[in-house]
Image (spheres, rainbow, N blue to C red):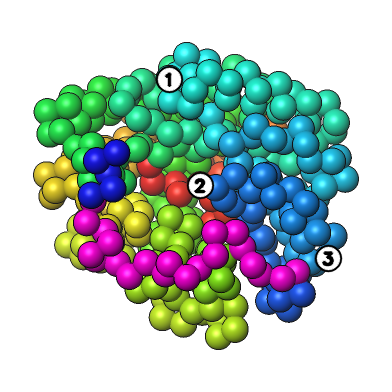
Amino acid sequence: MKEFDNGLEKKWDYDLDAPVDSDISVEKLKGFLKPSDTLIFYGGEPLVMVEKMKEIMDNVNCRFMIQTNGLLLDKLPREYLMKLDKMLVSIDGTRNRDVENKGAVHYDKVVSNLGGIRAKGYSGEIVARMVVSEKPDIYEQVMAILKLELFDSVHWQIDAGFYKNDFDFKEFSEFVGEYNKSIDRLLDWWFGEIGKGEIIKMYPFVGILNRVKGWDSETRLPCGAGFANFTINTNGDLSACPIMNSVRNMYCGSMDSGVVGKKVISGCEECGYRKICGGRCLYWREAKLWPKEGDDLICSTIKYLIDGIRSRAEEIEGAGEKAIELSHSARIFGEKGSLEETGAMAENSKRKRKLRKEDFEFEKYFGPEIIP
Ligand code: SF4
């Protein structure tokens, strides 16, 4: 409960007049959204407002997605379920880990609900949205999720820098050391799978690889907050990101005015990793809840991850002992693709291979922040 004293109320002008529940009419949404737009239901937990969701899906012509804790997915009738192109569902890894983080009922109910919607024929993408909190064993947790065979893809975020009173230099330094080791294991496994022809859709890896390779030339926040992705607040004002909802000085327009005053990340100007990282998180950068030494530790995980992806990609495409053998075809996100040979022979007779952009394509800006 110490977090109530985090100082943000002095820094930010909270819009206390904004209603608790959205009072945006369906008519207004209809006028605001174009068929090419995507509306992502978000909360709190959006499925507690299932009747409003149904009304919106019945009347608004656009794509729909949802970010949910998954507990009420069984309450959504099949015809509406089928209207959701993708969903991000919270789950943190093994049953034990999820119980530790989210309480006793979440894991079993989510696993049962996801099995239920797959049985109903839901074939849209289901992203496992993980939080990495005190324990750094990301490798084991991701493996546990993949074993469930309920998710198409995985994204995680480190719970660091989002609260003022949870920073401890020694503890977090140890976390970073262990997390980076676990990331190495996960990267070795991921690139090993690529070598066997399987590309597993892990958003941090796929998103960073796209930037490292120059396939994604965008250099701003990979989540799209404030330029490609906006939050409609309960009163119709727009925020760059849902975490900043109802913060007046972070508004960037409204449903009436459209987008005005885009938000730009600050604090990363001198960083050599900026074009890949984009600044990690606008809320983290603006709220500044951790001291600099804590933020530097967070940045060290980002740099380690980017370096790890870059060096392994270079090994695949480069010559020499470390070159990773790739099979002739790769199964990309469930479909057959292929990895292109350069035709040149490597020094040690291993064939050089080239990672192909089209095999690592992914939809941007719908929820996964990319940078953990
Ligand atoms: S690594 Fe840190 S300083 Fe560098 S761009 Fe990312 S968030 Fe900014």
Secondary structure beneath label 3 = helix
Instruction: Tell me, yes or no, whether the highlighted magenta stretch contains residue 10.
Output: yes
Q: CA distance from mark 3 to mark 2?
A: 27 Å
Q: Quadrant of the N terminus?
A: top left
Point 60% across, 59% down: residue: 21
- The relative height of residue 245 versus residue 211 in the rendered view (above or below) is below
Q: CA distance from mark 3 to mark 1?
A: 40 Å
Specify whether residue 32 is in view. Answer: yes
Q: Is residue 48 left or right of residue 190?
A: right
Name the amino acid, label 3: Asn
Point 72% across, 27% down: residue: 113
Main SS, magenta region, reads: loop
Q: Is residue 55 left or right of residue 42?
A: right
- Give the extent of the magenta segment: 6-26
Question: Which residue corresponds to mark 3?
Answer: 59
Within 10 Å of disc 3 (Cα), the crowding (few <14, some 14-19, many 20+) is: few
Q: Residue furthest right?
A: 79
Between 170 and 23, the one nearer to me in the picture: 23
- The relative height of residue 351 versus residue 189 in the rendered view (above or below) is below
Question: Which residue corresponds to mark 2?
Answer: 368
Q: Quadrant of the C terminus?
A: top left
Q: CA distance from mark 2 to mark 1?
A: 23 Å
| Residue 216 x/y as whole percent | 47, 58
Between 350 and 312, the one nearer to me in the picture: 312
Name the amino acid, label 2: Pro
Secondary structure beneath label 1 = helix
Question: Which residue corresponds to mark 1?
Answer: 100
Instruction: Tell me, yes or no, whether the highlighted magenta stretch contains residue 302.
Output: no
Q: Is residue 44 left or right of residue 182?
A: right
> Does the numbered disc 3 mark a residue whose Cβ is under 8 Å from ligand 1?
no
Within 10 Å of disc 1 (Cα), the crowding (few <14, some 14-19, many 20+) is: few
